Structure formats: structure tokens, C-alpha cells
Amino acid sequence: MASHATDPDAVREPCDDCGERTVHRVRVEIRTESEKAENARFSREPYRIAVCRRCGAETATRMNDE
């Protein structure tokens, strides 16, 4: 019996570009929102980044907005 390793970073979710549920690579990224250097260290926020493995479309969702 063959065993298939599952990528723990792959998630099946809707893709607006493909129009169906596809496998996405998901990660969390810290982004700096302020363009001013003196405020940059106070404006870091976590974002959920999902990239469709079929078409490459990327969505970024600010996690503190929920």
C-alpha cells in the first residue's frame, strides 16, 4: 500500500481566480504597515498569506481585523 505524505502547509480553500476550491500554500507573515521609518517598529501586524498552487493568486488577510 502506497503512502502519500501530506504537506502540512497545504490547505484546500476557495480561489476567486480559479473559481473553485484548490490547494493553497498558507503562511503567516509579519508586515510593516507604516511607511515612516520612525513608526515602523510600532506598525507591525500579522497577515495570513494564502497562495493558490494552481494559478498563483495570492491573498493577504490582516489577522487582527477579526
Image (cartoon, helix red, strand yellow):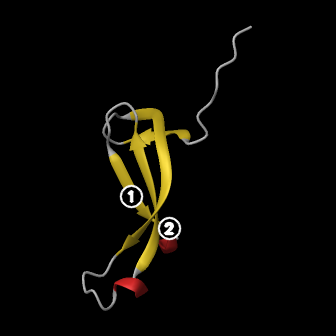
From the top left corner, tell me how far across and down residue 18 is, in percent: 33, 34
For residue 53, what is the image quadrant?
Answer: top left
Residue 63, disc: 2
Residue 60, disc: 1
Which of 47 and 38 lies nearest the eye of the viewer? 38
From the top left corner, tell me how far across and down residue 11 is, in percent: 54, 40
Q: The N terminus is located in which quarter?
A: top right
Residue 25, disc: none
Amino acid type, residue under disc 1 in the picture? Ala
Amino acid type, residue under disc 2 in the picture? Met
Q: Residue at x 48, y 34 (%)?
A: 23
Which of 6 and 64 lies nearest the eye of the viewer? 6
From the top left corner, tell me how far across and down residue 40 is, in percent: 34, 84
From the top left corner, tell me how far across and down residue 35 is, in percent: 25, 81
Instruction: Identify whether 1 is placed above or below 46.
Output: above
Bin the neighbour count of mark 1 within 10 Å (Cα to Cα): few under 14, some 14-19, many 20 and up.
some
Helix, strand or loop for disc 1: strand
